[in-house]
C-alpha cells in the first residue's frame, strides 16, 4: 500500500520534473539562442507542435489503458487524401471537414473493433492499419497533391490572433487539452482508464466495461487524427497521401517522455503536453543553432532513453536503501 | 455514460461546423493575383559582398543535391558571400517548412530551395520574402507567386524529348518501355514524364509502348525493388527510363547483376561517377544530365544579383553568372541553365561529378 503511494508520488514528481525541465529549456533557449525568444519564432514553434500535441491527447488515454495506436499518422494522411479528392469533386469545404473527422472516427472504430471485439493485440493491429491506411491514402489521391483550398481557411490556420504571436489554432488545442485533461483526471471515465491500465481483470470486477471504454478511445483517437489531418492539409495548403509520415513516433515519444508508462496505468496529461513542448523546443532551438539533423536525432534518442531509465533507477535505489535499513534495524 | 457523452460532443461539434457558414466549394475560389515585385532592377548595381545564402535541398545526404549545393558554395566563395546548407532527412512536403521558418529567424539574405511540394512551402516562403529575404528556387520549382526566380536545369520539353529519344534508340526502334521515377509528387520528374508521354503519342514513337511508371521514392532499396518488379511484371521490357539519379543507379545495379544484362537497357538521368562502372561493363550504353554543380552555382549568382538589386525576377532582365557567362530571365522568372549532356563510353571519363 505504502509502496503504491510511493509510486504515485514518484510519478507525480516525474511529471513535475518534465514540466520543470521544459520551462528551464525555454528560459535558457530564450537567453542563449539567438532569434529564439521572438514572437515570430514562438508562432513557428506552436504551429510545429500543434499536430503532435493534438494527437498526443487521445494517445495518452490509450497508452494509459496499456494499449497503443500507431495508425494515427496514416489516419492523418488518409484523411488528408480524402479531403483533397472531395474538394476536387466540388464538395463545399464546410461539408468536407466534418466528413473527414467522421472518417477518422470510422478508421479508429475499425482499430477498436479489432482490439476490443476480436481481442487482438493493439500493437499488431495498429501496425497493420498503419500500413493499410497509408496504402489507401495513395489509392485515393495517388501521386497528386491538391492545393487550391479556400484562402479564408488556409490563412486562418496559419494565422495568428490579431497579428500577435498566438496562432489561431492554439485556441482549439487549449480547449481540447482542457477537456481531455479534465476527463482523464477528474471523471469516472478517467478513473476507468487508469484502472483498466493498472489491471484489466480487477477493473472488470470493479464493474468497468474496459472493452467498451477502449473501443471509444480508439474512435476518439481516430477522430482527432482526422481533425489533425484537416488542420495539416490547410496549414500546408497541400492535400497529399504522404502527409504526416512518421508522426506516430513523434507522438509516442512525446507521450513517453511526458512520464506515461508504456505498460499502462500511469501518466498525466500535463506531463505529456510538457513532453511535446520539450521535444519541439529542443528541435527548434538546436536548428536555430545550425545543429545537424543527425545530432538532433541523437539528442532526442538519448532524452527518451534517459526518461525511461531514470524513474527505474530511482526506484531501485530507493528499494535498495529501504532493504538496507530493514536489514540494519534488528542489529541495533 | 461515455457513449452518451461522446455522441453529444460529436453531434454538437458537427452542428457547430455545419452552422458556421454556407458552403465554400472549389468553384468559389477566385484566382489570387501573383505578388509582382514593383522594384525596378538596376543592372549596373554593384554585387553585394557578405550575402548570407542558405541552400535548402529536397533532402540532405542525397548525392545529387550534394553536388548541386557544392556549386553554390563555390559561387558564394567567388562572390565573398556566406554559404549555409540545411534540410530535412526525408523528402516529404511539409518537412521543409520548419527549416524555412528557422532561416527567417536567422535573417538570411537569400534562400535557395528545391521544393518537395510547390504549394506546401508557399506561405512560409512568402513570409520570408516579406521579411526581405530573396527566394531562388532551383531544380524543383515552388509555386510562381512564392519565389523571385527559378533556376531550371533545362527546359521540361528538352528533357522529355531527350528521354523519349534515348528510349527509342536503345529499344532498337520498337518495343516495351517503363519509367522508374522518384517520388510521386516530384514536380520536375512528373513534368518530364508528361512530355515523354506526349512524345510517345506522336506517330514516330507509335512503335514504343509505355508499360508503367513506377516510383522508387528516390530511395535506393525501394528503387532497386521497383526495377526488379518491373522486369518480373513485363517480361518483354526493353528499356527502363529513370529520370532520377537514385533510380537509374539502382536499376542499373539490379540489371547488371541479373540475367537481363545486355537484354534490357537502362537509361535516363544519372551522374557520371555513379554510372561509370555500369557504362564500362556494358549495362548502360548512354544516359544524360546537366552538370548539377552548375545549377547551384547559377542559383547563388542569381541570388546575389537579386539581393544586390541587379535583377528583380522580371522577364528580359540580364545578369552575369561568373564562369557560366550571361543569362537572361525568361517567362515567370525562369532562368534556363542550358541543354543536357549525353554521356557514353566515349566521353564519360572527361567528367568527374
Image (cartoon, coloured by chain):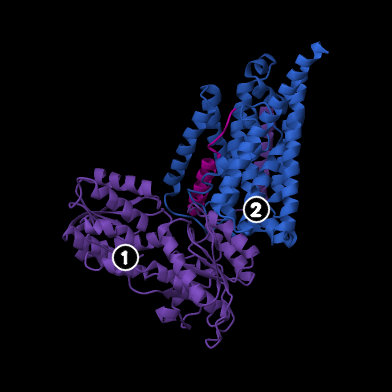
Chain colours: A blue, B purple
Badge 2 local density, few (<14 within 10 Å), some, or many (20+)? many
**Tag 1 residue:** B160
Q: Is residue A170 left or right of residue B173?
A: right
- Tell me, yes or no, if residue A197 can be seen here: yes
**Which residue corresponds to the image point at 74% horizontal and 41% vertical from the top-left?**
A19
Q: Which mark is residue B80?
A: none
The quadrant of the image that shows the N terminus of chain B is top right
* Magenta segment includes A37: no
Horizontal and vertical percent position of residue A55: 62, 41
**Which residue corresponds to the image point at 21% horizontal and 58% vertical from the top-left?**
B208
**Which residue corresponds to the image point at 73% horizontal and 44% vertical from the top-left?**
A21
Q: Residue furthest bottom?
A: B44
Q: Quadrant of residue A20?
A: top right
- The foreground one among B329 and A212 is B329
Which residue range is magenta in the image?
A67-89
- The foreground one among A50 and A3 is A3
Label 1 chain ID: B
Q: Which mark is residue A47?
A: 2
* Magenta segment includes A72: yes
Q: Residue furthest right?
A: A332
Amino acid at each position: 500500500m505504502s509502496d503504491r503511494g510511493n509510486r504515485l508520488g514518484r510519478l507525480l514528481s516525474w511529471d513535475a520534473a518534465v514540466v520543470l525541465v521544459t520551462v528551464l529549456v525555454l528560459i535558457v533557449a530564450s537567453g542563449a539562442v539567438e532569434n529564439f525568444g521572438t514572437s515570430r519564432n514562438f508562432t513557428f514553434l506552436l504551429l510545429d507542435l500543434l499536430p503532435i500535441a493534438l494527437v498526443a491527447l487521445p494517445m495518452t488515454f490509450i497508452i494509459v489503458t496499456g494499449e497503443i495506436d500507431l495508425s494515427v499518422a496514416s489516419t492523418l494522411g488518409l484523411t488528408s487524401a480524402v479531403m483533397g479528392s472531395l474538394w476536387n469533386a466540388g464538395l463545399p469545404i464546410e461539408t468536407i471537414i466534418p466528413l473527414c473527422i467522421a472518417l477518422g472516427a470510422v478508421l479508429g472504430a475499425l482499430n477498436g473493433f479489432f482490439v476490443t471485439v476480436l481481442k487482438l493485440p493493439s500493437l499488431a493491429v495498429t501496425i497493420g492499419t498503419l500500413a493499410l491506411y497509408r496504402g489507401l491514402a495513395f489509392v485515393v489521391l495517388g501521386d497528386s497533391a491538391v492545393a487550391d483550398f479556400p484562402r479564408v481557411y488556409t490563412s486562418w490556420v496559419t494565422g495568428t490572433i490579431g497579428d500577435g504571436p498566438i496562432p489561431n489554432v492554439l485556441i482549439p488545442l487549449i480547449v481540447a487539452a482542457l477537456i481531455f485533461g479534465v476527463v482523464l483526471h477528474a471523471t469516472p471515465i478517467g478513473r476507468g482508464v487508469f484502472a483498466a491500465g493498472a489491471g484489466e481483470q480487477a477493473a472488470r470486477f470493479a464493474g468497468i466495461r474496459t472493452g467498451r471504454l477502449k473501443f471509444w478511445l480508439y474512435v476518439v483517437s481516430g477522430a482527432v487524427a482526422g481533425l489533425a489531418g484537416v488542420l495539416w492539409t490547410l496549414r500546408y495548403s497541400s492535400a497529399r497521401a504522404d502527409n504526416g509520415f512518421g508522426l506516430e513516433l513523434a507522438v509516442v515519444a512525446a507521450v513517453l517522455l511526458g512520464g506515461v508508462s508504456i505498460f499502462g496505468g500511469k501518466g498525466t496529461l500535463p506531463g505529456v503536453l510538457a513532453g511535446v513542448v520539450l521535444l519541439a523546443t529542443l528541435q527548434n532551438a538546436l536548428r536555430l543553432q545550425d545543429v545537424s539533423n543527425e545530432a538532433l536525432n541523437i539528442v532526442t534518442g538519448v532524452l527518451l532513453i534517459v526518461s525511461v531509465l531514470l524513474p527505474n533507477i530511482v526506484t531501485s535505489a530507493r528499494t535498495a536503501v529501504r532493504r538496507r535499513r530493514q536489514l540494519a534495524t534488528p542489529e541495533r | 455514460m461515455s457513449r452518451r457523452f461522446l455522441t453529444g460532443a460529436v453531434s454538437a461539434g458537427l452542428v457547430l461546423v455545419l452552422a458556421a457558414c454556407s458552403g465554400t466549394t472549389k468553384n468559389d475560389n477566385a484566382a489570387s493575383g501573383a505578388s509582382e515585385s514593383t522594384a525596378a532592377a538596376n543592372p549596373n548595381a554593384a554585387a553585394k559582398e557578405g550575402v548570407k545564402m542558405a541552400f535548402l535541398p529536397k533532402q540532405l545526404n542525397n548525392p545529387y543535391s550534394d553536388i548541386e549545393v557544392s556549386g553554390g558554395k563555390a559561387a558564394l566563395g567567388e562572390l565573398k558571400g556566406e554559404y549555409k546548407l540545411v534540410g530535412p532527412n526525408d523528402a516529404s512536403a511539409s518537412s521543409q517548412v520548419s527549416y524555412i521558418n528557422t532561416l527567417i529567424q536567422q535573417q538570411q539574405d537569400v534562400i535557395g530551395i528545391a521544393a518537395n511540394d510547390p504549394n506546401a512551402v508557399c506561405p512560409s516562403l512568402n513570409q520570408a520574402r516579406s521579411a526581405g529575404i530573396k527566394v531562388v528556387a532551383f531544380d524543383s520549382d515552388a509555386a510562381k507567386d512564392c519565389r523571385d526566380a527559378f533556376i531550371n536545369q533545362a527546359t521540361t520539353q528538352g528533357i522529355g524529348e531527350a528521354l523519349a529519344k534515348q528510349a527509342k534508340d536503345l529499344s532498337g526502334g520498337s518495343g516495351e518501355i517503363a519509367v522508374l521515377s522518384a517520388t510521386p509528387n516530384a514536380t520536375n520528374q512528373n513534368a518530364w514524364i508528361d512530355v515523354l508521354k506526349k512524345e510517345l503519342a506522336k506517330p514516330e514513337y507509335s512503335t514504343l509502348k509505355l508499360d508503367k511508371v513506377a516510383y522508387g521514392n528516390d530511395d535506393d532499396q525501394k528503387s532497386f525493388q521497383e526495377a526488379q518488379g518491373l522486369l518480373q511484371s513485363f517480361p518483354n521490357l526493353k528499356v527502363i527510363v529513370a529520370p532520377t539519379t537514385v533510380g537509374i543507379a539502382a536499376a542499373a545495379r539490379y540489371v547488371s547483376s541479373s540475367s537481363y544484362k545486355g537484354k534490357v537497357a537502362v537509361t535516363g538521368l544519372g551522374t557520371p561517377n555513379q554510372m561509370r562502372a555500369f557504362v564500362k561493363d556494358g549495362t548502360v550504353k548512354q544516359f544524360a544530365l546537366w552538370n548539377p554543380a552548375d545549377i547551384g552555382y547559377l542559383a547563388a549568382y542569381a541570388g546575389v544579383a537579386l539581393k544586390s538589386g541587379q535583377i528583380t525576377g522580371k522577364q528580359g532582365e540580364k545578369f552575369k553568372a561568373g564562369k557560366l557567362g550571361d543569362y537572361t530571365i525568361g517567362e515567370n522568372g525562369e532562368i534556363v541553365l542550358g541543354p543536357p549532356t549525353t554521356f557514353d563510353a566515349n566521353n564519360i571519363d572527361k567528367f568527374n561529378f
